Image (tube, grey):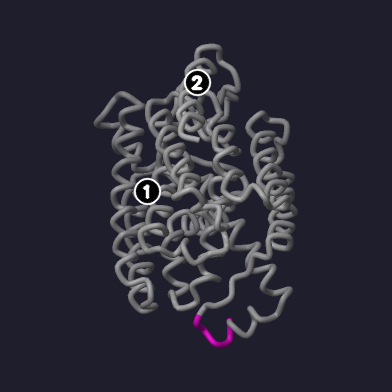
Amino acid sequence: MLYFFLLYFLTIIFFAIYFKKKKYLSNYSGDNHQLFTNEKNIPLVGGIFLVIPILSINYNNIFYILIILSIFMLGFLSDRKVIISAKQRFLLQIIIIFFSVIFLDLRILSSRILFFDNLLELLYFNILFTCFCLLILINGSNFIDGLNGLLLIYMTTVIYVLLDTSLLLDTNVKLLFESDGKYILFFIITLIVITILNLSNSLLLGDAGAYILSFFVGYLIIICHNSNPDISPYFFITLLWYPCYENLFSIIRKLKNKFSPLVPDNNHLHQLIYQRFNKIISDKVIANNASSILMSIINGIILLLAARYPYESSYQIKIILISIFLYTSTFFILNSSKSKY
């Protein structure tokens, strides 16, 4: 098994370099938002390298395999501009996520708000709400993937917190800890290798990578929530606050300015931070990485603070509110010098 892991990591490095040299599966399509912080012809292959590690986590569940492959293919076809329409892409997301909630029996069981918990006991409401949460997470994660390493580091930190708090030990995903945890170690090291290549501008996750990585982490969060009912549900919200709030804030911002929420733009917080760095650092890659590392440090502190008291809802709500305040106030400060749509 160890030799397979080493061979796989070397394969990732080799093909990332080879694809970039040959300009295979290139990111370049001429979209303004796509070229905001990246040079042309970076291969969109990060998602391809994540498929095997993610499938290995639960390879004996046929529904899990089909759903992961479906999500990956949707992202891959989006990356290759086969699916161009944002509305078509979103509709297909809804269909795949709906079937994932049904066949993987994904449920959000508690909010610790009596009225809302009564609604969650209604099967159809629970299904719709769980689908809504996963869709917000997936699209928010795709938004924050605009900087090298930002999504990868964030999701790696989330998985580290789940491991550090031993929440995954009580789940029914037993394959995570088969053979002394080799499968989860395989996945984490794969994330680290892809992150290094991403920071060096050797590859990008693309929609395919952002979709399957965020869905997988959302899947883990939900089963941890179900298997650890004593843990505050707000702790799990805190773990995913950034991509989810990025998406919700972006939707509100675009609707307010009469701009379609489905159309990408260059006005997300991480892009505003990049702009400020790029005024100081002329090299786009260095400015990109500096922005990503700064935001990763801040988010890492938030997640590690949340992990101190995972049982206390009031503590988690305070963390969430402070995080939202920091995000929103920073956005308006940085955006004050920019013209509106």
User: Residue 219: where, in percent of width, then height?
Assistant: 57, 57
User: Residue 130: where, in percent of width, then height?
Assistant: 63, 66
| Contact? badges 1 and 2 (CB < 8 Å) | no
Q: Is residue 291 above or below residue 35?
A: below
User: Residue 166: where, in percent of width, then height?
Assistant: 40, 63
Q: Which residue is mark 1?
A: 335
How many callouts does the rendering have?
A: 2
Q: Amino acid at mark 2?
A: Lys
Q: Residue at x 43, y 53 (%)?
A: 159
Q: Amino acid at mark 1?
A: Asn
Task: Say which element carries label 1.
Answer: helix
Name the outermost residue toward the top: 22
Magenta segment, which residues?
Answer: 112-116
Q: Residue at x 48, y 33 (%)?
A: 5
Tell me if residue 149 can be seen.
yes
Mark 1 residue crowding within 10 angstroms, few (<14) / some (14–19) / many (20+): some
Q: Is residue 84 magenta?
A: no
Q: Is residue 114 magenta?
A: yes
Task: Say whether residue 55 is left or right of residue 228.
Answer: right
- Residue 303 vs residue 184, the one in the foreground: 184
- Residue 138 vs residue 67, the one in the foreground: 67
Q: Which mark is on residue 40?
A: 2
Give the distance between the C-alpha atoms of the residues marked 1 and 2, in whole angstroms: 27 Å
Q: Is residue 70 above or below residue 18?
A: below
Q: Residue at x 37, y 53 (%)?
A: 331
